Image (cartoon, rainbow, N blue to C red):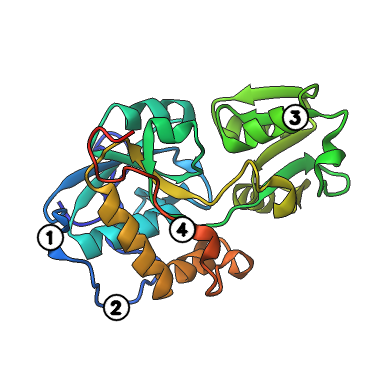
Amino acid sequence: MAVGASLAPFALAGCGSTQGGATDSSSTMDPADGLSGRHLSFVGDDAFAPYRYIKMQPDGTQKVVGLDIAIADEMARRLGFAYDFEPQEFAATLASVQASDTSFTMAMSSNAEREQTYDFTRGYYQPRVGVLTLGGGAITSIDGLAGKSIACTTGTVQNKFVSTTLPDADIHTYDGGDQCLQEVLAGRIDAYVCDGAEGQSMRDANDGLVLGLLERDETKDYVGVYRIMATKGASFVDAFDRCIGEMLEDGTIDQFIGTYVGADFQWGGDFSAAGTASKGVGSVGAN
């Protein structure tokens, strides 16, 4: 199998190798990382633009692309492994990753509860919380959601943020972001609280939608940086973590963020918010 993501034959045509114009920088990763020739699975939603989404190719085939795919492809190139992309809705993704020591997912925030079950790399992306509405003024603070019906994707950090900060709000949860979007477009829900970059993609693709971005100071206790996540003790996470660190330092990740999300979301050389890998990475049976 070629380095990079490929979908099952009955689904979509395979993703190619390194995407997004990555630089051909030489890697400093140690061959002793032991990933050369290994086969892993990337599990995740394929309707989560700009991180992972389906794009029609000139030859009529479909391909999953996005920020996460570009980063995963580049890690595969540097570390010498191959992977399949397995599309699943968010709720199913968590169980799939937990059940397999060869699976990973991306665009996940860590917290104390999740770290009981999963290991995480350092962060590769700093998200913002978005609020999508149909018309009207942009909602840019949590107070602006008072009295509104709110949609969230079940189990996400945005869901937890809204439920905690607005415990009496009219909150409706759905399995995927597309369902939340359709409820807003149909006028059945007032606002979809989402990942800000996801909301940006949805706004750009749908006339009439308005996107507000909440300040990070208002959401930082609930929504951390996005990391790669695998089941507790998965042997490859330590190598992934060090590779992410290398790609932050050499500018590859900022290049991908610029391509798939926008310059306003780049790190710009300050990686202090990236943090470190969660405790127990690379140690089977770690607590």
Q: Amino acid at mark 2?
A: Ser
Q: Which of the two labelled residues, at mark 2 and mark 3, occupies the earlier sequence position?
A: 2
Mark 1 = which residue?
32
Q: Nearer the viewer, residue 85 or 194?
A: 194
Q: Amino acid at mark 3?
A: Ile
Q: Residue at x 59, y 37 (%)?
A: 157
* Image spot of residue 219 (x, y percent): 69, 46
* Distance between mark 4 and mark 2 Cα atoms: 18 Å
Q: Which of the two labelled residues, at mark 3 and mark 1, occupies the earlier sequence position?
A: 1
* Distance between mark 1 and mark 4 Cα atoms: 23 Å
- Residue 66 appears in view: no
**Label 3 packing within 10 angstroms: few (<14), some (14-19), many (20+):** many
Mark 3 = which residue?
150
Q: Which of the two labelled residues, at mark 3 and mark 4, occupies the earlier sequence position?
A: 4
* Distance between mark 2 and mark 1 Cα atoms: 19 Å
Mark 2 = which residue?
25
